[in-house]
Amino acid sequence: MSNQSQVDFLEQVQDSYGSTQELANMLDMGVEMLFYLEENTFHKQDVQNVVTALRAVTTALRK
């Protein structure tokens, strides 16, 4: 990943999540969800937020 890509990624993280720690927290929740995803285990909005975070990371990494 180039330096500019890293800067762009960090700016995207900051704009979307406020900090890299918040994004990491969202991704950690996503990992947990994958192990325990059953009906009524997590709120639908939480699952959607994790999907959005994973998409943001994959999009940034593909640039």
Image (spheres, rainbow, N blue to C red):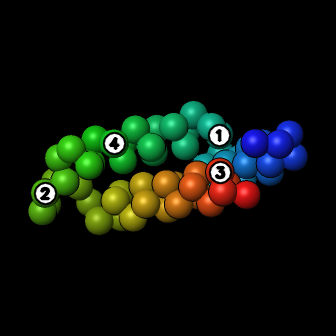
Q: CA distance from mark 3 to mark 4?
A: 18 Å
Dots 3, 4 in contact, CB < 8 A: no
Q: Position of residue 21 (x, y in %)?
A: 57, 34
The residue that disc 3 covers is 61
**Residue closer to the observer: 1 or 13:** 1
Horizontal side of 58 relative to 34 (left or right) equals: right
Q: CA distance from mark 1 to mark 4?
A: 19 Å
The residue that disc 4 covers is 31
Q: CA distance from mark 1 to mark 3?
A: 17 Å
In the rendered view, tell whether residue 59 sits above or below residue 3.
below
Q: Is residue 43 visible?
A: yes
Q: CA distance from mark 2 to mark 3?
A: 29 Å
Dots 4, 2 in contact, CB < 8 A: no
**Residue closer to the observer: 35 or 2:** 2
Q: CA distance from mark 4 to mark 2?
A: 14 Å
- Residue at the top extreme of this rendering: 21
Horizontal side of 15 relative to 29 (left or right) equals: right
Residue 37 falls in image quadrant: bottom left
Mark 3 is surrounded, within 10 Å at the Cα level, by few (under 14), some (14 to 19) or many (20 or more) other residues, namely few
Q: Which SS class for mark 2? A: loop
Q: Residue at x 33, y 42 (%)?
A: 31
Residue 28 falls in image quadrant: top left
Mark 2 is surrounded, within 10 Å at the Cα level, by few (under 14), some (14 to 19) or many (20 or more) other residues, namely few
Mark nearest the camera among 3 and 4 is: 3
**Mark closer to the chain start, 2 or 3:** 2
The residue that disc 1 covers is 19
Inspect the image, locate mark 4, and give the three-letter code of the amino acid beneath it.
Val
Q: Which SS class for mark 1? A: loop
Q: Position of residue 19 (x, y in %)?
A: 65, 40
Q: Which SS class for mark 3? A: helix
Mark nearest the camera among 2 and 3 is: 3
